Amino acid sequence: MKSLLGKLNREHSLELEEYQLLIENINPDLMKLAAEYAVKYQKEYYGNKVFIRGLVEFTNYCKNDCFYCGIRRDNRECERYRLRMDDIISCADEGYKLGFRTVVLQGGEDLAFKDQDICNIIKGIKAAHPDMVVTLSIGERDHDSYQAYFDAGADRYLLRHETANPELYARLHPGEMSFLHRMNCLQDLKNIGYQVGAGFMVQSPGQTARDLAMDLKFIEEFKPDMCGIGPFISHKDTPFAKEKSGTLEMTLFLLSLLRIIYPQMLIPATTALGTIDPRGREKGILAGANVVMPNLSPTSVRKMYTLYDNKICTGEEAAECINCLKGRVSSVGYEIVEDAGDRVGFYK
Ligand code: SF4
């Protein structure tokens, strides 16, 4: 297996079967070697810098019913909220004061926010802070909507593909959702000129090593600017309530493989990683991640945006969050920087 990892390190590409073999044969030695290769690239392109993105979860309404998600449409137990436009802009202002130069506006697919509303929010943030990068994470929209947000000033878009296997996609989502549409959205976003973030769940219900290999192959070929992965964690009010969570080990191993596949890619140490292990995010950085995404949402709504159970950081103010993260990141020899944090080599 080590020679296969060596091949990946030289060529940044493997056959699907080879990725599958690596995943099936995960062991501590292989994880260690993968992390060594990964950190070499992380340091080469980003030094010991870790970028921060301030997350504003502005609505937990969603028209979709993904089987794994705590804010899915049919979850009657979920208390719903929408932030007002000036509240969203205030969160960005607060983030700017704390040193954030990227804000991520994240929400369910909430059609109450029309395209014009989204554009006005983007313009409001840009007017107050021209050097603040605006990232959207609001799901599937049509090409014209994506274009309108981009023209209004949005810079980046996060849309996890969740799995690159259409059959698994169909088992994780209701029939009204389409794998092909999700993939077309990602392509549209890239064509328009966004920095694009894709990503997938690790060890979601029914997922095989082959499925994960397909995710790695997809990332190798699509080359998103960012790839976010997190272990699957169940939510009590979903059809997957009793399913087992993904493991820290597999998530860290895949994270290292992603860094080796595409060394310049932005890779977050996700909140889900911090949820399954108290030092999950630090371990993520040591496996090759270079981004963390603390929460800027008002504390009054944090607990209502739970995609999975036991999510961390739902109680602290933004300033507390960032101070806590600075300490965590420096404890493993890295440094949070006040920087928009583009992918190395990305030119708008
Ligand atoms: S995963 Fe996203 S699209 Fe699916 S139900 Fe949750 S918020 Fe909606």
Image (cartoon, helix red, strand yellow):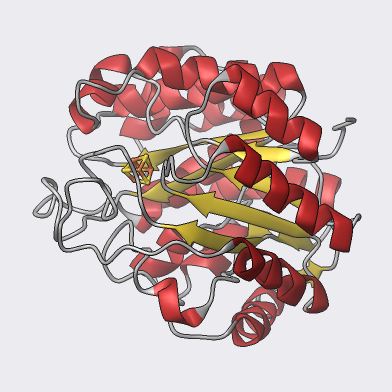
Residue, x 20% and y 28% (percent of image)? 174
Where residue 22 sits: x, y (%)? 41, 30
Compared across the picture, whether 16 is left or right of 168 comes to right
**Residue 219 in the image: above or below residue 229:** above
Q: Quadrant of residue 147?
A: top right
Residue, x 64% and y 39% (percent of image)? 116
Q: Choose between 214 and 237: the one closer to the eye.
A: 237
Where residue 79 sits: x, y (%)? 26, 67
Q: Quadrant of residue 13?
A: top right
Residue, x 30% and y 23% (percent of image)? 177
Q: Choose between 190 and 223: the one closer to the eye.
A: 190
Tell me, yes or no, if residue 246 can be seen here.
Answer: yes
Residue, x 30% and y 49% (percent of image)? 232
Q: In the rendered image, which quarter contains the C terminus? A: top right
Q: Choose between 82 and 216: the one closer to the eye.
A: 82
Tell me, yes or no, if residue 333 can be seen here.
Answer: no
**Residue 335 in the image: above or below residue 132:** below
Q: In the rendered image, which quarter contains the N terminus? A: top left
**Residue 142 in the image: above or below residue 326:** above
Compared across the picture, whether 204 is left or right of 142 comes to left
